[in-house]
């Protein structure tokens, strides 16, 4: 029931905001976000308390003979993903408060629509529904970028983004249908059974289909080229939605669909995927090192981190998956944090070329300090949320292959290289003509940064609530495999 | 007269097939719209011939009834066709079908 | 009693948070007192904890909270109290406190004063976590934490890009080591299923199940972590640069505490190394080479802090030699004594620099003896201690290492003697050039010369005292008996925590070795005296360095330059290749290519749609015929 | 049932008189038709036979008739403002279109080859006229001529096929034919006939390689007529084709299936890839409707086991979407003075949000993006093919549908790119209403798809 609520509220509010028009659209959106967060907490509380779990599931036959049904259920993993969504939603909305959009009601309407579909994807327990939500989330973001972007050739960029991801996910559809041919039902547990019944070789092929779909969206080298351009073109709120939440649907899909459905396929024929993921760590780090623009740096750094994420998850053990869940959460928060920083800088300098800055710390130490914490989170320093996830991922990956662990682990070094380089270039040294009038943070920016920093630190110091929330589900998932 | 006694349905079939083919090739190689109409009519008649032959073979009359239908429809078709052709002629002053290539790609 | 240990790291943390968030508007005096007093409190608690351990309390694990749970992998955030950690607590908080006090004087005129104190507090906090952690993961928290603190403190004067670069270098080189450490942890977990010390070593010793090859791999990758932190070849290059930070930082982080984390970690894992010949040999050789390298480079340096930095590098090398030879307690012994006299020396040099108004080049000093007597005296004590003259602290610890080397490996033994010879020489070179002869600096410097304030000199005095008596915690058998004192006290104290070597050395050899060591030390001191005091030779200016050997040493074997060409440049070039060609041309080219390919084919297919009726009919009939033929 | 059928005919005849009432009456007639279908629904245990069993109004027929009438109603409403109410053109237009709707109904309900033939002709002949109805416009003439000419050629071929089958079986009745060769090993005569008919239909539904006429005709004909052809006529043709193959050749030999498979592949590849290069949006939509023919042929190909209702669903949803897009195209290009390039759509979102919205939704639906009913239609097609293990075909479908998304999205993007001095485009309240309704329909049918499982066809 709560799941339905989680989807219905933004859906309804999207409509409401759309109808009520531009005034007070953002406030309504923000309220919606907060309400969602509260509902999520309620759900988590129900899950933890363990009594009346029926609140967390909803199942309604949709197209019976085709075995499609509106089936939603919140287990630990889904709850974490939903938490990610609903934690970031208010932040993202609030971060857009200092901007004025052309007809904001459409903007926020679309945003909430997207949120609804993403929560749907995170909570559904029906294969086809997942695909549907997964796909549908594309439409709002497509328009958000297309309409509210100011970048050159945005039509081209958005088109590429849309087509690329659509094209990828069609492979998922084929794989899904292929398994469906044996299960005759899209209920996940049936799909699991049918998938595991396939021969390892078949599983390998089906896995390839899924992986291409997800690799495009995560994104994993070499399917990533749409991403930096899109981030660059997107309005920051859109980029946050993309990087923070939307792309997590893919990695979530790996956990929810691929691992339990095709364990042998991954184990025996999945090596190439793990190799790709590890390579993309190196490649993206290399790209990040040469970036001149901060926004692109964020883009590539997130590719690097998600490479580790993908490899870790695909290693298919409890540590890898738990790390994946944790990392998704923390990466979402950190990336949004970095985008907030970008916004602050961009609003003051009206460009984001790092080498033209410097000495901002001298002018605005508070900002520098908060930024530094976020950077530390991004380089996965212990006591920040980044560490727990990344460490577990490597721990898991190592059980698959130590060589790959070393390659993927290089993110520890290279991440420090490019993040510190950029921090140094922008913040340290003596201020120059561009930066010496760097305005102090206003209330909204302060609030945002403090919230994000707080999340990063708290989750880093005391991640147990999250981990212990998802751990049982992960273990049941793995029991399903063996 | 002996000659015509051992004519089986196959002969008719062959004949009508030939006619049909002739029509087809006519349509294929002639450029004059009128002629092409004629060819199509030829094809239809080939069909009629076949039907009649068959209905003789199965000796019941369905086939022959159908032939009438065909004739009627063909007539209607030709009427419409000629109308269109007239219009075309009024606009283009020719019945050569090669000029009809404004719509392409 | 052990429960109290939670407070030890808590105080500094509280101090840090308070200063960062509410520190505005308070006087420097207040901030300084606050920061120092937090450490003092931790020190007091540490003493309590230590005494319980001394009276043979069993090692205890104090759980703070649940931390990480992932399937079979479960790590609590909890502290392990045992002799090893408790003695580390003691000198970290002790030396830490002294240096805090010192800093209140040294940094008094800096506008970033409160920030500095806060960082120091944070550092102490992480250092304590490092030694208290009851598992590799918890230890790693402190491990990385001190790393980032050192980053912040090296780059404390952030307006000068040189400092920032040094800080970045330190952090990144450390990160390389950390990667090794992470890999080590991963392997360890993969084969034992746990990363808790007491599961691994104390109670269970799950490590016995690990196949030999893997054990070596684990040992070495853990040691790579140690290399990073403790500046061993080839990851030593960051430590000298790290001197860019304020001098108290160099004293606390880059001499006394942080850099000895590597030794701590290896000692902690003694069970792992004890039975692992290969890994141990790697450690020995890395250690002795580093030691030689550091000692030789130190011979020619002219920056007072650089000399001390390289001396630190070589001393750390010696400690690793001890570790590699299985004398873990000996290494810890040297760590402690080294903490005393090296902290003393750094603080002394700080006091000198303070007096000289920021000047660090010994070629601009000289004759400071009369201007700053306290500093001079304490510095002299420190110098004697490190040179290893009986009965100063350095003598005993170093002598033990030499003795072990003698037992285990004669070559290493010789080398270690050479190292101690060099040490004595360059230290006294430093001492003479700084405090004797006539002043070589500018006039306003000479005018400005003065003894440092009490807040700085008192710590010096205390540390000096410790450098004198510190050695008695590990008296060798022979001396112990002579003086009727408790010998090898430290070894006995640590025997539950680390593996003990089976030393069976006759008193005779022990004494002989001591004599040799003393002779070596004294002779090279005398040599230094004859050159720099008697003949009053001065250090060469950069330009008139003749012998290539001298150049080689002065330029630190050009190692930085070598790394630059074999690592940094290639990385940049490859990344550049990615950015300029691979991404836009190759990968994206393929993506875009498919698009344009489709368009092109579309262009071809269009031709089919030529619009001529006859073609359509033709296709129609051909199609029909084709189908009929296909039957 | 038959009453309403006649009703339309009568109506169509007497249109010539009272022109004001044309629209209302037509709508009324169609609604009556719809109503009667719904009323007769479900009595399929005693199929409702006409003309001595030559028409058989089983649920299949009723279902498709409903689809036709729904589409027709929308079509009439949307095109209502194309001609001033009292022009003779208008009445002719209506009469002719209604005639061809009769043809459609016949095609969905025939149970004898004779009726099949008649249906096809009744459907087509008015269309030849309609296609050419823009008398002064040469393009329209050309379209009409090409359509007529190739059309009659195709019907000749189809007739020959019918004749051969008659020869092979001695009957025109579908059921009897089925029983004659129930085993599935066809005589050469039968097979040839089957193929010829297939070819004829292939032409009518415009699948490759018999599709060449379609883009030209669709482009040349007046846009409203194009909409009619692309939706109702296509649906009818498929209805007829499916009925034939489902009843008479339920277990046709493999070769026929593989021919169809090849046809589908060709259609999808040719149409989609060619569409990418189009500049005229009208022609673009023509190609897109070709590609949809490919999907629908999939259902026919699997007619052995695939329930007809999926085809119905597809025709309906596709029909709605493409009708909407064509009629919007018609509006826009007429405002732009006949310019129907992508430029013409620039900034439509500002100039007429409702239009832009409707267009976007229909295009996305045709692109098969969930949760629009277009996705479900394609999904059904794909599952059908998969159940027959035509993996290759499925792959082609998926690749091409990605290509399709490309050209649809470019059009959408154009609509959302702002332009200066964008004057608003006015639309009649009726149109606006229609657009909204249709848009909703495209959304709702997706979720209402569960109804599909309740009905038995």
Image (cartoon, coloured by chain):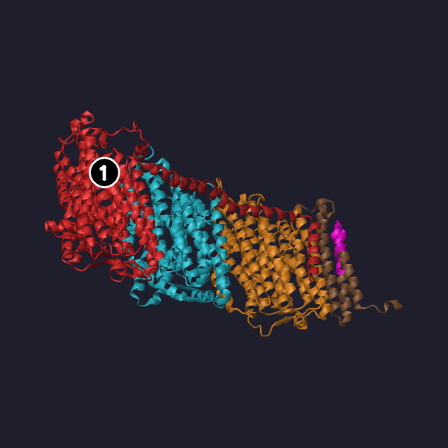
Chain colours: A cyan, B brown, C red, D orange
- Can the viewer see residue A470? yes
Give the crowd class for mark 1: few <14, some 14-19, many >=20 residues within 10 Å: some
C493 relative to C540 in the view: left or right? left
Residue C400 drawn at (x, y percent): 20, 48
Q: Which residues are magenta?
A: B24-45
Which image quarter is the C terminus of chain C in?
Answer: bottom right
Which image quarter is the N terminus of chain C in?
Answer: bottom left
Residue C478 drawn at (x, y percent): 15, 50
Above or below D413: residue D375: below
- Can the viewer see residue A97? no
Q: Which picture quadrant has residue A114?
A: bottom left
Above or below A98: residue D36: below
B10 relative to D218 in the view: left or right? right
Does the stretch in magenta take in C537? no
Nearer to the camera, A405 or C519: C519
- Report the residue at 63% width, 62% height from top: D258
Q: Chain of mark 1?
A: C
Residue found at the very far front of the displayed protein: C508
Nearer to the camera, A388 or C602: A388
C364 relative to A302 in the view: left or right? left
Above or below A102: residue D112: below
Quickly name the residue at label 1: C246
Residue found at the very far bottom of the displayed protein: D46
Identify the element where label 1 is drawn: loop
Residue C392 drawn at (x, y percent): 15, 43
Nearer to the camera, C417 or B63: C417
């Amino acid at each position: 029931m709560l799941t339905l609520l989680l989807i219905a509220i933004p859906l309804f509010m999207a409509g409401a905001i759309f109808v009520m028009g531009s005034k007070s659209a953002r406030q309504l959106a923000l309220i919606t976000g907060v309400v969602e967060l509260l509902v999520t907490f309620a759900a988590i509380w129900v899950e933890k308390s363990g009594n009346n779990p029926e609140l967390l599931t909803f199942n309604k036959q949709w197209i019976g003979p085709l075995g499609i049904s509106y089936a939603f259920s919140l287990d630990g993993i889904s709850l974490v993903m939903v938490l990610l969504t609903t934690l970031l939603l208010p932040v993202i909305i609030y971060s857009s408060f200092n901007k004025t959009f052309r007809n904001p009601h459409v903007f926020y309407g679309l945003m909430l629509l997207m949120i609804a579909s993403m929560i749907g994807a995170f909570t559904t327990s029906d294969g086809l529904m997942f695909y549907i939500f997964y796909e549908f989330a594309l439409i709002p973001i497509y328009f958000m970028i297309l309409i509210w972007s100011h970048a050159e050739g945005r039509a081209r960029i958005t088109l590429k983004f849309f087509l690329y991801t659509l094209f990828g996910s069609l492979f998922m559809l084929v794989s899904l249908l292929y398994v469906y041919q044996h299960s005759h039902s899209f209920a996940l547990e049936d799909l699991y059974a049918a998938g595991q019944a396939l021969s390892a070789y078949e599983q390998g092929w089906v896995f390839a289909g899924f992986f291409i779909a997800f690799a495009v969206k995560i994104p994993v080298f070499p399917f990533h080229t749409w991403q930096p351009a899109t981030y660059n073109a997107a309005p920051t709120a859109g980029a946050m939605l993309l990087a923070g939440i939307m792309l997590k649907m893919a990695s979530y899909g790996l956990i929810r669909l691929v691992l339990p459905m095709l364990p042998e396929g991954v184990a025996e024929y999945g090596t190439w995927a793990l190799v790709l993921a590890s390579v993309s760590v190196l490649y993206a780090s290399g790209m990040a090192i040469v970036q001149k623009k901060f926004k692109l740096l964020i883009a590539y750094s997130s590719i690097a981190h998600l490479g580790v994420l993908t490899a870790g998850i695909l290693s298919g053990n409890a540590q890898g998956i738990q790390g994946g869940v944790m990392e998704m959460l923390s990466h979402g928060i950190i990336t949004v944090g970095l985008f907030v920083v970008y916004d602050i800088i961009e609003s003051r300098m009206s460009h984001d070329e790092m080498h033209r800055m410097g000495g901002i710390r001298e002018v605005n130490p508070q900002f520098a300090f908060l930024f530094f914490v976020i950077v530390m989170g991004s380089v996965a320093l212990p006591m920040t949320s980044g560490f727990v996830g990344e460490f577990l991922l490597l721990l898991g990956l190592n059980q698959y292959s130590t060589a790959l662990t070393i390659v993927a682990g290089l993110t520890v070094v290279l991440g420090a290289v490019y993040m510190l380089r950029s921090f140094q270039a922008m913040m340290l040294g003596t201020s120059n003509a561009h930066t010496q009038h760097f305005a102090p943070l206003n209330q909204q920016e302060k609030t945002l940064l403090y919230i994000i920093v707080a999340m990063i630190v708290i989750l880093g110091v005391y991640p147990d609530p999250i981990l212990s929330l998802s751990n049982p589900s992960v273990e049941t998932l793995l029991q399903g495999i063996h | 007269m002996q000659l015509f006694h051992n004519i089986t349905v196959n002969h008719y079939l062959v004949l009508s097939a030939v006619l049909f083919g002739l029509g087809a090739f006519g349509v294929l190689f002639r450029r004059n719209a009128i002629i092409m109409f004629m060819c199509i009519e030829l094809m239809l008649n080939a069909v009629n011939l076949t039907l009649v032959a068959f209905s003789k073979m199965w000796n019941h009359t369905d086939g022959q009834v159908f032939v009438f239908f065909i004739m009627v429809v063909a007539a209607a078709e030709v009427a419409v066709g000629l109308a269109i052709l007239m219009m075309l002629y009024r606009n283009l002053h020719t019945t050569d079908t090669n000029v009809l290539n404004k719509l392409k790609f | 009693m052990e429960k109290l240990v939670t407070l030890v790291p808590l105080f500094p943390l509280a101090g840090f948070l308070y200063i960062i968030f509410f520190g505005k508007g308070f006087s420097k005096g207040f901030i300084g007192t606050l920061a120092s007093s937090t450490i003092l409190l931790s020190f007091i608690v540490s003493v309590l904890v230590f005494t319980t351990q001394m009276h043979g309390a069993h090692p205890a694990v104090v759980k703070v909270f649940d931390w990480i749970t992932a399937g079979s992998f479960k790590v609590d955030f909890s502290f392990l109290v045992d002799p090893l950690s408790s003695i580390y607590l003691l000198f970290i908080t002790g030396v830490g406190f002294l240096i805090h006090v010192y800093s209140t004087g040294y940094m008094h005129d800096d506008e970033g004063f409160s920030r500095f104190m806060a960082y120091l507090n944070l550092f102490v906090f992480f250092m304590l976590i490092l030694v208290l952690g009851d598992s590799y993961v918890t230890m790693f928290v402190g491990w990385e934490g001190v790393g980032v603190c050192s980053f912040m403190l090296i780059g404390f004067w952030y307006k000068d890009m040189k400092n920032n670069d040094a800080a970045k270098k330190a952090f990144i080189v450390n990160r390389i080591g950390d990667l090794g450490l992470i890999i080590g942890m991963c392997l360890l977990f993969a084969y034992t299923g746990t990363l808790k010390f007491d599961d691994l070593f104390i109670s269970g010793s799950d490590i016995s199940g690990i196949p030999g090859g893997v054990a070596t791999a684990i040992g070495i990758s853990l040691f790579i972590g140690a290399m990073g932190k403790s500046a061993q070849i080839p990851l030593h290059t960051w430590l000298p640069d790290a001197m860019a930070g304020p001098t108290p930082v160099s004293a606390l982080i880059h001499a006394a505490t942080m850099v000895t984390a590597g030794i701590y970690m290896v000692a902690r894992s003694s069970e792992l190394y004890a039975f692992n010949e290969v890994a141990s040999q790697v450690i020995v050789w890395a250690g002795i080479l580093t030691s030689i390298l550091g000692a030789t480079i130190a011979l020619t340096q002219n920056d007072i802090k650089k000399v001390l930095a390289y001396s630190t590098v070589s001393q750390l090398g010696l400690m690793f030699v001890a570790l590699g030879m299985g004398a873990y307690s000996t290494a810890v012994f040297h760590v402690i004594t080294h903490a005393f006299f090296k902290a003393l020396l750094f603080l002394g040099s700080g006091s000198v620099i303070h007096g000289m108004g920021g000047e660090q080049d010994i070629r601009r000093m000289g004759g400071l003896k009369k201007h700053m007597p306290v500093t001079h005296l304490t510095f002299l004590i420190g110098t004697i201690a490190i040179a290893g003259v009986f009965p100063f602290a350095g003598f005993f610890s170093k002598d033990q290492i030499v003795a072990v080397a003698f037992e285990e490996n004669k070559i290493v033994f010789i080398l270690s003697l050479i190292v101690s010879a060099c040490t004595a020489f360059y230290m006294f070179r430093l001492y003479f050039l700084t405090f004797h002869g006539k002043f070589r600096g500018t006039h306003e410097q000479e005018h400005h010369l003065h003894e440092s304030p009490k807040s700085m000199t008192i710590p010096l005095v205390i540390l000096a005292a410790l450098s004198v008596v510190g050695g008695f915690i590990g008296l060798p058998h022979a001396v112990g008996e002579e003086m009727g004192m408790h010998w090898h006290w430290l070894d006995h104290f640590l025997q539950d925590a680390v593996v003990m070597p089976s030393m069976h050395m006759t008193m005779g050899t022990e004494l002989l070795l001591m004599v040799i060591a003393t002779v070596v030390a004294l002779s090279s001191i005398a040599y230094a005296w004859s050159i720099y005091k008697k003949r009053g030779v001065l250090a060469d200016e950069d330009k008139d360095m003749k012998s290539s050997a001298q150049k080689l040493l002065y330029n630190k074997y050009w190692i930085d330059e070598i790394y630059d060409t074999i690592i940094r440049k290639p990385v940049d070039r490859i990344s550049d290749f990615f950015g300029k060609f691979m991404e836009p041309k190759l990968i994206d080219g393929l993506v875009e290519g498919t698009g344009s390919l489709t368009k092109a084919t579309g262009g071809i297919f269009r031709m089919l749609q030529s619009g001529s009726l006859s073609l359509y009919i033709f296709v129609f009939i051909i199609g029909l015929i084709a189908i009929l033929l296909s039957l | 049932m038959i009453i309403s059928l006649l009703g339309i005919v009568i109506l169509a005849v007497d249109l010539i008189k009272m022109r004001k009432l044309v629209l209302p009456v037509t709508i009324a007639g169609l609604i009556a038709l719809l109503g009667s279908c719904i009323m007769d629904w479900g009595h399929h245990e005693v199929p409702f036979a006409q003309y001595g069993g030559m028409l058989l109004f089983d649920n299949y027929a009723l279902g498709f008739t409903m689809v036709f009438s729904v589409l027709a109603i929308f079509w009439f409403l949307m095109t209502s403002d194309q001609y001033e109410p009292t022009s003779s053109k208008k009445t002719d237009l209506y009469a002719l279109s209604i005639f061809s709707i009769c043809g459609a109904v016949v095609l969905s309900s025939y149970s004898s080859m004779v009726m099949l033939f008649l249906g096809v002709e009744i459907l087509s002949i008015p269309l030849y006229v309609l296609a050419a109805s823009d008398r002064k416009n040469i393009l329209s003439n050309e379209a009409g001529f090409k359509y007529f000419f190739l059309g009659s050629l195709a019907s000749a071929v189809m007739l020959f096929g019918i004749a051969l089958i008659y020869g092979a079986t001695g009957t025109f009745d579908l059921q009897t034919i089925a029983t004659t060769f129930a085993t599935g090993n066809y005589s050469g005569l039968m097979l040839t006939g089957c193929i010829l008919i297939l070819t004829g239909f292939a032409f009518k539904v415009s699948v490759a390689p018999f599709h060449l006429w379609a883009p030209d005709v669709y482009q040349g004909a007046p846009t409203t007529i194009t909409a009619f052809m692309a939706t109702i006529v296509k649906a009818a043709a498929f209805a007829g084709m499916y009925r034939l193959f489902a009843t008479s050749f339920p277990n046709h030999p493999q070769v026929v299936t593989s021919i169809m498979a090849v046809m589908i592949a060709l259609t999808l590849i040719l149409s989609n890839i060619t569409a990418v290069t189009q500049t005229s949006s009208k022609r673009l939509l023509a190609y897109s409707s070709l590609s949809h023919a490919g999907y629908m042929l999939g259902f026919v190909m699997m007619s052995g086991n695939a329930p007809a209702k999926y085809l119905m669903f597809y025709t309906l949803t596709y029909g709605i979407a493409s009708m909407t897009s064509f009629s919007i195209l018609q509006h826009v290009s007429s405002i732009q003075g006949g310019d129907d390039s992508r430029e013409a759509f620039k900034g439509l979102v500002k100039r007429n949000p409702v239009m832009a919205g409707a267009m976007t939704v229909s295009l996305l639906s045709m692109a098969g993006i969930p949760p629009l009913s277009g996705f479900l239609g394609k999904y059904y097609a794909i599952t059908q093919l998969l159940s027959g293990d035509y993996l290759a075909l499925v792959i082609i479908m998926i690749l091409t549908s990605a290509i399709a998304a490309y050209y649809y999205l470019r059009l959408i993007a154009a609509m959302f790119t702002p332009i200066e001095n964008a004057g608003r485009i006015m639309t009649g309240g009726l149109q606006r209403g229609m657009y909204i309704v249709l848009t909703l329909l495209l959304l709702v049918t997706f979720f209402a798809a569960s109804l599909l499982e309740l009905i038995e066809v």
